[in-house]
Amino acid sequence: MKLLRPLILLSLAGLLSGCYPLHAMHGHFDLMARRQPVGDLVADPETPDTLKSRLQRVATMREFASRELALPNNDSYRKYTDLSGDYPVWSVWVTSEFDLAPHLSCFPIAGCVPYRGYFSRQSADHYAAEFRSAGDDVMVGGTIAYSTLGYFDDPVTSAMLRLPDERLAGLIFHELAHQVVYVKNNATFNESFARAVEIEGTLRWLVSKQDLEGLARYQAALARADDFFASVRTTRDALAMLYASALDPEEKRQAKARIIEALRETHRQRKLQDVAWAAYDSWFTDDINNAKLAAVSTYFGDVAMFRDLLDNSQGDFEAFYSAVRSLAAARQ
């Protein structure tokens, strides 16, 4: 069956018009062609010790994912791809200037998603340029992991290995969760569910490692993430009221800038109280607009609901996945 998948995707590319399908197919197969089994690299005496050590820890995380979190036991994230750039994929998010809803890109397998991915920054910027010229809000950001939802054996990338261990483990758990439940045309459902698995999985992984210091650090980071999203949600609520108002475009533009500046000020005040908030500096340094806020909302929007559902499942992942599947069926 796996041998048919490249042919199926090539057929789909031939049915679609324009250059994007060809770009996607070329980038995908280039990344897949450079995969190497983690076990082979660890056994190879030519592999640098630093890389070998990291890959050994990846193997441990991957085994934990299937053994303790009931995540798929397949070859995904058991292979490694050394990238030629900083990221495997660049995502482009677009909204109108006075609208919080992101533009959708629709595909035969994944359905409609609120972004479009490119295998090069240059291609992503080229796509984004026309929207910027039209006055739309745009965000272009690098994506560390690469997922085909289990249709191929997704690799660990060199970009992923830049992360600290707890974030790397969480990312592997997150991406594997997409292979358990995926709802077409509902990115917030999919990403929030995967983040809930990521959070609980990382907590359990740190406990299993008896890494009390890492556990405390991760729990503190989770609390900051919750506060960060609460601020983003407040900002989005204020912007939604503004956009629905009868103000003229220039008045809306000025009020929008004030609302976003208030979000920046919240961050500055938090950092004065706790230097750990500096971890969010890069997010606040870059342009903040509707597209960027939409991306945050997509990944955080329903996380609390899924964490509550896991609690109601007594922390049993099999029962949790069954409950999520039922919830997904009701929403399709």
Image (cartoon, rainbow, N blue to C red):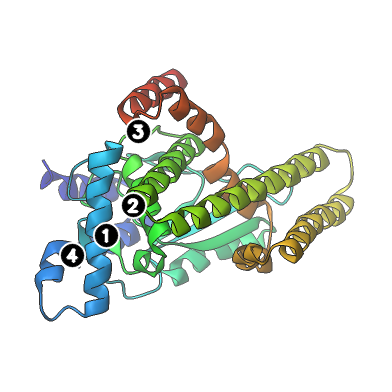
In the picture of the structure, the residue carrying the numbered disc 2 is 172
Identify which amino acid the numbered label 2 is placed on: Ile
Q: Mark 1, residues whose alpha carbon is within 10 Å: few (<14), some, or many (≥20)?
A: many
Identify which amino acid the numbered label 1 is placed on: Val
Q: Are marks 3 and 4 in contact (CB under 8 Å)?
A: no
In the picture of the structure, the residue carrying the numbered disc 3 is 181
Q: Which residue is drawn at 40% across and 32% down?
A: 183
Task: Find numbered disc 2 in the image and state the secondary structure of the residue it sits on.
Answer: helix
In the picture of the structure, the residue carrying the numbered disc 4 is 33
Which quadrant does the C terminus fall into?
Answer: top left
Identify which amino acid the numbered label 4 is placed on: Ala
* Gap between marks 1 and 3 measured at Cα: 23 Å
Q: In this view, does 192 lie to the left or right of 237?
A: left
Identify which amino acid the numbered label 3 is placed on: Val
Q: Are marks 4 and 1 in contact (CB under 8 Å)?
A: no
Q: Which of marks 1 and 2 is nearer the N terminus?
A: 1
Q: Is residue 207 above or below residue 48?
A: above
Q: Viewer-nearest of labels 4 and 1?
A: 1
Q: Viewer-nearest of labels 1 and 2?
A: 1
Q: In this view, does 162 lie above or below 172?
A: below
* Gap between marks 4 and 2 measured at Cα: 20 Å
> Can you tell which quarter of the image residue 106 is in?
top left
Task: Find numbered disc 4 in the image and state the secondary structure of the residue it sits on.
Answer: helix
* Gap between marks 2 and 3 measured at Cα: 15 Å
Which quadrant does the N terminus fall into?
Answer: top left
Q: Do the residues labelled 2 and 3 touch (CB within 8 Å)?
A: no
In the picture of the structure, the residue carrying the numbered disc 1 is 58
